[in-house]
Amino acid sequence: MAKEGLEMTEETEHMIEKNVAKEPDSAVCAADSKEMRAVLLTGFGGLNKLKVTKKLMPEPQEGEVKIRVKACGLNFLDLMVRQGNIDNPPKTPLVPGFECSGIVEAMGENTKGFEIGDRVMAFMNYNAWAEVVCTPLDWVYKIPDEMTFPEAAAFCMNFVAAYMMLFEVSNLREGMSVLVHSAGGGVGQAVAQLCSTVPNVTVFGTASPFKHEAIRHSVTYLFDRNVDYVAEVRKISPEGVDIVLDCLCGENTGKGLGLLKPLGTYILYGSSNMVTGETKSFFSLAKSWWQVEKVNPIKLYEENKVMAGFSLLNLLFKQGGCSQVKTTVQKLLSLYSEKKIKPIVDSLWALEEVKEAMQRIHDRGNIGKLILDVEKSPTPLMASDSTETSEAGEEEEEHEGDNDNKERMPFIQ
Ligand SMILES: NC(=O)c1ccc[n+]([C@@H]2O[C@H](COP(=O)([O-])OP(=O)(O)OC[C@H]3O[C@@H](n4cnc5c(N)ncnc54)[C@H](OP(=O)(O)O)[C@@H]3O)[C@@H](O)[C@H]2O)c1
């Protein structure tokens, strides 16, 4: 792996300051600078654990591509990482982020297939939310000229997960029906679009009511996330559905399995319900675990049902699935070029606005994907008593609740 830009100790910071003594102040952002801006998670917990900091720029090792980042994807999983609400959380401090897009700036040894200047999107095993990243070439994909950088940063995680669940795990075919939760979110909208590439697929979706007008066209039947969706689906399709995609977990596992038609497939791929506030709640974790249906394989056999799990990042980073993922990305890029799919970007945020961006997901406000736009300047904070903005590379201690009475308006694309 790349020698990631370690957060600078006082000593190294001083050395770098000496090295770049003749550079202008804006050197932090300059292409030839040895420093870069990155989002840092200083410890697991609330939004106050995030800050923008300066780090040493990583250099590509053998088999790695160095990317000048333009845009980074912000996923629900990033909230869970921030809270430490994941299995085997890594040590903090760390730079979060699992995907980005940008321009190839350099290559390590043995990196055939890429040239400096290529426009690319990439998966990262953390460290994506920075101005420069290095990642193995197996996780990097060239993007078409017509694809914008925000679109590319919104593409990989959502569409690859949606595609593999629909077409590889559950074999979606003409005339089938699919139930998807959080239908207005990043994965939800990717699922809806991919379902529309197959004739006569019925999509049942749940989402917060304010999103319904915006996403109604993308699903066949849309329900308020608070209603009894099992009863609503049964009213329309008494026999149930062919595929249930469950990112909520808890009691929804039993409900999803119960809704399956014979030979239907239930896939668990997330546990959004475990996030009930800004910090990790052991109560909601225990509740979700307790409510998960204890599945009896004999019952599955008797009822002709399939139960599956899907984790793209485990497939990619722990189980050697890069060639399967690469093949999927190529298929998805063809669908994109044929204008059959298009990532929905909810809003663009500067790195310095990462807390507000995450808050938007906590508030269930997003329709599509949130993007951190590395070149965007923070929007001035709106507050009656102050219009201060956080500076790029700010390093001063942050105090919980500092910005409680100020909010930034996202730049909606
Ligand atoms: N297994 C994999 O490979 C994989 C890959 C990508 C994503 N995922 C999972 O898929 C799910 C969706 O991911 P995403 O990145 O596309 O996010 P997303 O759906 O855009 O997430 C935000 C939306 O989730 C819904 N939501 C449900 N529970 C919530 C809660 N407790 N707090 C806040 N919002 C909640 C809200 O929509 P409504 O209010 O409209 O429901 C919210 O707007 C997540 O569970 C994620 O971990 C899994």
Image (cartoon, rainbow, N blue to C red):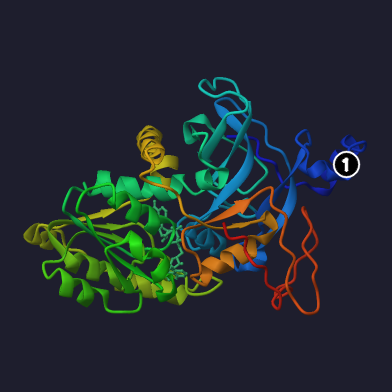
The answer to which of 354 and 323 lies nearer the viewer is 354
State whether label 1 is within 8 Å of ligand 1. Answer: no
The answer to which of 130 and 200 lies nearer the viewer is 200
Q: Residue at x 52, y 20 (%)?
A: 112
Identify which amino acid the numbered label 1 is placed on: Glu
Q: Is residue 116 left or right of residue 156?
A: right
Q: Residue at x 78, y 39 (%)?
A: 30
> Within the image, what quadrant is residue 35 found in?
top right
> Within the image, what quadrant is residue 44 found in?
bottom right
Residue lying at the far right of the rendered structure: 22
Q: Establish if 357 lies above or below 155.
A: below
Residue 291, horizontal then vertical, whole percent: 30, 73
Q: Establish if 68 lies above or below 118.
A: below
SS state under label 1: helix
Q: Which residue is mark 1?
A: 17
> Within the image, what quadrant is residue 55 found in?
top right
The answer to which of 326 and 399 lies nearer the viewer is 326
Q: Is residue 125 visible?
A: no
The C terminus - image quarter: bottom right
The N terminus - image quarter: top right
